[in-house]
Amino acid sequence: MKRRNGLVFVLLLVVVSVPAAFASRFDDLAARYESAAAGNADAEALRIRLAEEAENISPLDLWDSLMREGISPELRAANALALLDALVPDGDPARWNETGGFWRPREIPTPLAAVDAILYAAGALAEMNDPGAPWLARKLLLAFLSDPAAALLFADHGPAEYAKTVYALTRRNVLPPHGVWRKDAPVGRLPLAREVRGFVTRDRAYAEGMTFLDAIGRPAANGVYAWDRIRGRIYEVADDRRLWMQP
C-alpha cells in the first residue's frame, strides 16, 4: 500500500511539474521573440542611418576601405553595407551568389567581395554600442546563412573573424531562433576576395583541398580558378600537370 501511495505521489509531481516547465519554456521563447522584435526595429533604423554615412566611392574602393587601418567600426559597417547594396540585388545577403565577375585589372572576384561585405559588416556591428547594431548583424547573418552553400562554406568552415563575431553576439545574448550560431573549425581569414595571381594544377588544387571558382568567380564543384583559403590566395587553374604553383 505504501509503495502504491509513493507511485501516486510521484505521478502527481510529474503532472504538476510538466505544465510548469512548459510554461517556463514558453515564457523564455516569448521573451526572446519580444527582444528580437524590438532589436529588429532598432536594426532597421540603424541601417538607414548607416546608408547616409557611407563614403561616396566606387565599389572597389569600398572593398579596399574595409581593410583600412584606423577605420571606425561604424564607418566600416557603413561602407560594408554600401558595398553589399552595390553588389547584391536588394542588398540581400541571401542573394550573395547572384553577383558575378571580376574587378579588373586587379582580377578580384566580386562574389567573394560580397561575402566580405557581409562578414565585415557583421563584425563591425558586433563591436558597436548602438542598440540596433548586434540585431542588424544577426539579421545579416541569418539571411546569409539561410543559403545552404553559404552556411557550409562560410560558417561551418568560415574565416576566423566569423567565429569571433558570433562569439561576440552570443555574449550579448543575440542568438538565432534555434539558439546557437552555426560554426565549426575556422579556415583562413578575411578578406576572402584576393587578386588572382599565378597558376596551380588541377590535381594539386584537389590534393590541397582548395575551393574552385567558376569563370565569374563563384564557388563551384569545379572551375577555372582555385581558391586556397588557408593561405589566402586565388590561382588560375592550369591543366598542364608539369606546371607547379607559382608564388
Image: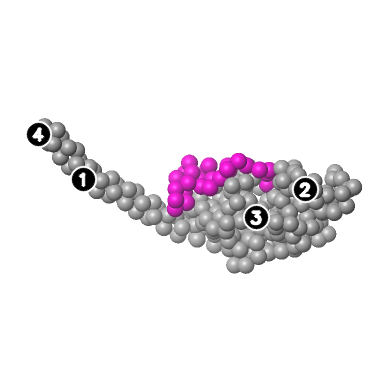
Q: Estimate the spatial distance between the alpha carbons at disc 3 and disc 1, rounded to whole Å.
A: 50 Å
Three-letter residue code for mark 1: Val
Cα distance in 3D space between marks 1 and 2 = 60 Å
- The disc at residue 52 is none
Q: In the image, what residue type sits under mark 2? A: Ala
Camera-nearest label, 4 or 3 = 4
**Which residue in the structure is indicated by mark 3?**
115
Instruction: Characterize the local packing of mark 3: few (<14), some (14-19) or many (20 or more) Cα atoms within 10 angstroms.
Output: many
Q: Which residue is mark 4?
A: 1
| Tag 2 residue | 205
Q: Nearer the viewer, residue 146 or 110?
A: 146
Q: Position of residue 137 (x, y in %)?
A: 54, 52
Task: Provide the residue span drawn in magenta.
Answer: 163-190
Q: Amino acid at mark 3?
A: Val
**Disc 4 and disc 3 in contact, CB within 8 angstroms:** no
Q: Earlier in the sequence, mark 4 or mark 2?
A: 4
- Residue that label 1 marks: 15
Q: Nearer the viewer, mark 4 or mark 2?
A: 4
Residue at 29% across, 49% down: 22
Upstream in sequence: badge 4 or badge 1: 4
The image shows residue 88 at horizontal and vertical percentages of 64, 64
